[in-house]
Amino acid sequence: MILTRRAAIGSAVCFGAAAGAACGVDAAVPRTPAQTSGPFYPRARPADQDADLTRVKGMRGVARGQVIRVSGQVLDRQGRAVQGARVDLWQANAAGRYDHPDDGSDAPLDPNFQGSTVLVADADGRFRFRSVKPGAYGGRTPHIHFTVTGARARLTTQMYFPGEPLNARDGLLRSASPREAVIARAIGRLEADPEALAFGWTVVL
């Protein structure tokens, strides 16, 4: 199914218990489980810090791997949108390698992959970015790291992908409670980017 951008945003926001009041449900909103930032938080950022991680300013190529689009929303515990939340995210490339001096993996780096960015949520707490699906490594299932900071709360966590074979064996994912809160939801592909896999995710601070 192909979705318009407006429909994709709505689908991304209104799913699962975490959406709470944002979808008209009068219920307490559980906080997204905190998870470790891991050892590969970026020490240096590329000059190109935008919402498209598949390209790097000054490079002609594009990142290798399956392109993804993530549409998310940041809420507080009352289900209200967190306007202006700072969304700091970083991930491995499609081969499972971080652009970090401490990552000693034999997997190749990708000079066309941005690898990290910092976004600011809009008035409805929404954010979106384009990237590649990160590769698995060292027993870890594919995931993206996030540190999300609002006016009153800060959360470091990880976002996972549905249906991954390694999900059942990843210790960090298995430790999350509720586990569903850190697994993104697959949504229909966007009209504007039909070759990208599209996911929705809600972060509750």
Image (cartoon, helix red, strand yellow):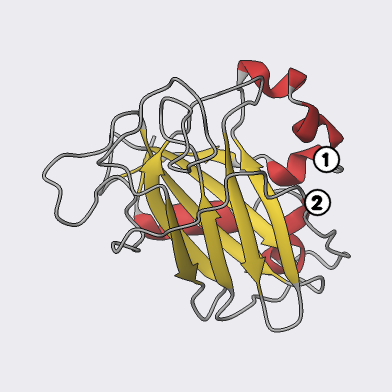
Which is more N-terminal, label 1 or label 2?
A: 2
Q: Identify the residue at image location x=50%, y=56%.
A: 43
Percent from the top left, x then y, of residue 65? 33, 28
Q: Secondary structure at mark 1?
A: loop
Question: Which quadrant: the C terminus?
Answer: bottom right
Q: Three-letter amino acid code at disc 1?
A: Ala
Q: Position of residue 39 (x, y in %)?
A: 64, 44
Q: Secondary structure at mark 2?
A: loop
Asked whether 133 or 91 is in front, the reply is: 91
Which residue is rendered at x = 66% and y = 46% of the image? 158
Tell me the residue at 36%/59% (across/down): 51
Q: Which residue is mark 1?
A: 176
**51 and 81: which one is in front?**
51
Estimate the x, y position of residue 31 in percent, counting from the top left: 82, 60
**17 with respect to 165 (left or right):** right
- Amino acid type at image mark 2: Pro
| Mark seen at residue 33 | 2
Residue 7 spot, x, y in % from top left: 44, 55
Q: Are marks 2 and 1 in contact (CB under 8 Å)?
A: yes
**Quarter location, residue 153:** bottom right
